[in-house]
Image (cartoon, helix red, strand yellow):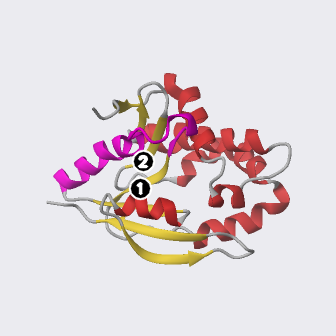
Amino acid sequence: MPPAVRPATLDDRDVVVRALARAFDADPLTNHLLRKDAGRARAFRDVFDVAFRRWSLPAGGAWLAEGGGGAALWTPPGQWKPWRAWPDVAALVGAVGVTELPRVLRAASRGSKHPSAPHWYLFAIGVDPDHQGRGIGTALLRPVLEQCDARGQLAYLEASSEVNARLYARHGFVVTETVDLAAGGPTVRLMERPARG
């Protein structure tokens, strides 16, 4: 039986942030962008907290696996609004470090090229390492991908590793472009999933 998932609420904030921070601990892109010093753990928490509260939750795109084993942060078509994070800009700058900010902004602009067509954007999906291998990632993808199919909508994401890209390919995503980030950063695979119908 697939794991149960449900829309997340603000009351789930700590659980969502913890699951994503743990899931992305070894992610090559996240580790390239965020600070690597003693503030690293806080940087991970701050970024996922801002993404949850400012980008995904207000748009109705935050999902949580029952038991807190994983979470997904989506935004529906027309709802990806990075400026919503403005009240937390100090936390985001602190997550990368002031001196690294120009490098991170360049990398972020190179590694994200949203389609021009209306689309659901998967900012982040992660399963806590203690809960992996139980189908939670698939369960977290399912509700939004079913909506995409029912409404004839596109889905888009940036895969930060070949392993992740293979997982998304099993769910119908295809690589549309590969971007090598500057300054020794990882290769990012831009992926889209046309609606199945």
The residue identified by callout 2 is 74
Which quadrant is the N terminus positioned in? top left
159 falls in the magenta region: no
- Secondary structure at badge 2 equals strand
Instruction: Left or right? Give the position of 111 relative to 90.
Output: left
Span highlighted in magenta in the image: 126-151
Give the x, y percent position of residue 52: 53, 39
Mark 2 vs mark 1: which is more N-terminal?
2
Instruction: Left or right? Give the position of 28 relative to 115.
Output: right
Which quadrant is the C terminus positioned in? bottom left
For residue 75, above or below residue 69: below
- Residue at 85% of width from left, 49% of height from top? 37
For residue 7, above or below residue 84: above
Give the x, y percent position of residue 36: 80, 52
The amino acid marked with disc number 1 is Tyr
The amino acid marked with disc number 2 is Trp
- Residue at 43% of width from left, 30% of height from top? 8
